């Protein structure tokens, strides 16, 4: 059963997240949004993974700038997403993915997958935390700027 939950990051920030899948899953994933927010596409990715037995949490990273953002894929949406992303310091999303990892079943092996801006954050999940057993980074353009960082898990 999918639902919207509230997470508390270590820095005190409260954010929403989309959660799906069995709470007793042996495998779990943090799914990190594109610059379009936790929109219908991100929820469908989560639902598809949940249907395969994964517990999944997708944190709403834009909550640090503006709550409830769901964008489409027009040029205006891209510009708005980039603007929102520019208002968020890099440490915030790292705290948010850690909070998402903590919301997954404790016994589960945890991974992280991200797309676009989320691809870069999935890289940071591998390099700046030790919460994940694996990371998959899809078209994360910001990875090049931190390519010297060492991952703590397979990427």
Image: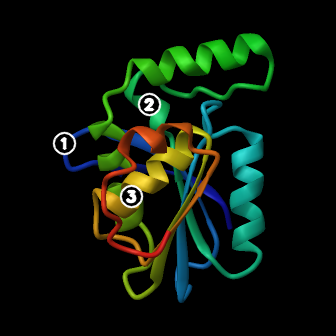
According to the picture, the residue beneath numbered tag 1 turns out to be 11
Say which label, 3 or 1, has the lower sequence index.
1
Asked if 133 appears above or below 123 in the picture, the reply is below
Residue 119 position, x and y percent, is 55, 48
Tag 2, which secondary structure? helix
Picture disc at residue 65: none
Q: Name the residue tied to disc 2.
A: 63
Q: What secondary structure is found at the residue carrying circle 1?
A: loop
Regarding residue 66, the answer to whether it shows in the image is no
Closer to viewer: mark 3 or mark 1: 3
- From this viewpoint, which residue is outermost toward the left? 11
Separation (CA) of disc 3 from disc 2? 19 Å
Q: Residue at x 66, y 29 (%)?
A: 70
Whether tag 3 and tag 1 are in contact, CB under 8 A, the answer is no
Whole-angstrom CA distance, mark 2 to mark 1, is 14 Å
User: Badges 2 and 1: C-beta atoms under 8 Å apart?
Assistant: no
Residue 137's x, y, as percent?
57, 56
Quick one: label 1, few (<14), some, or many (20+) residues within 10 Å? Answer: few
Mark closer to the chain start, 3 or 2: 2
> Camera-side residue: 9 or 74?
74
Q: Nearer the viewer, residue 96 or 2?
A: 96
Query: Whole-percent x and y of residue 74?
Result: 80, 18
Image point 59% across, 26% down: which residue?
A: 69
Q: Earlier in the sequence, mark 2 or mark 1?
A: 1
Tell me if residue 35 can be seen. yes
Residue occupying image coordinates x 68% and y 82%: 53
* 42 and 154: which is toward the camera: 154
Q: Residues within 10 Å of mark 3 (few under 14, many from 20)?
A: many
């Amino acid at each position: 059963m999918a639902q919207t939950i509230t997470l508390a990051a270590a820095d005190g920030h409260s954010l929403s997240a989309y959660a799906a899948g069995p709470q007793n899953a042996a495998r779990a994933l943090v799914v990190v949004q594109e610059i379009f927010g936790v929109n219908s596409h991100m929820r469908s990715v989560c639902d598809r993974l949940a249907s395969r037995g994964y517990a999944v949490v997708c944190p709403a990273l834009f909550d640090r700038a503006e709550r409830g953002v769901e964008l489409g894929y027009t040029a205006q949406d891209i510009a708005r997403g980039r603007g929102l992303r520019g208002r968020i310091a890099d440490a915030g999303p790292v705290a948010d993915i850690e909070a998402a990892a903590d919301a997954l079943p404790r016994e589960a092996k945890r991974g992280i997958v991200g797309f676009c801006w989320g691809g870069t954050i999935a890289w940071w999940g591998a390099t700046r935390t030790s919460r994940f057993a694996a990371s998959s980074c899809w078209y994360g353009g910001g990875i090049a700027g931190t390519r010297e960082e060492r991952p703590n898990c397979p990427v």
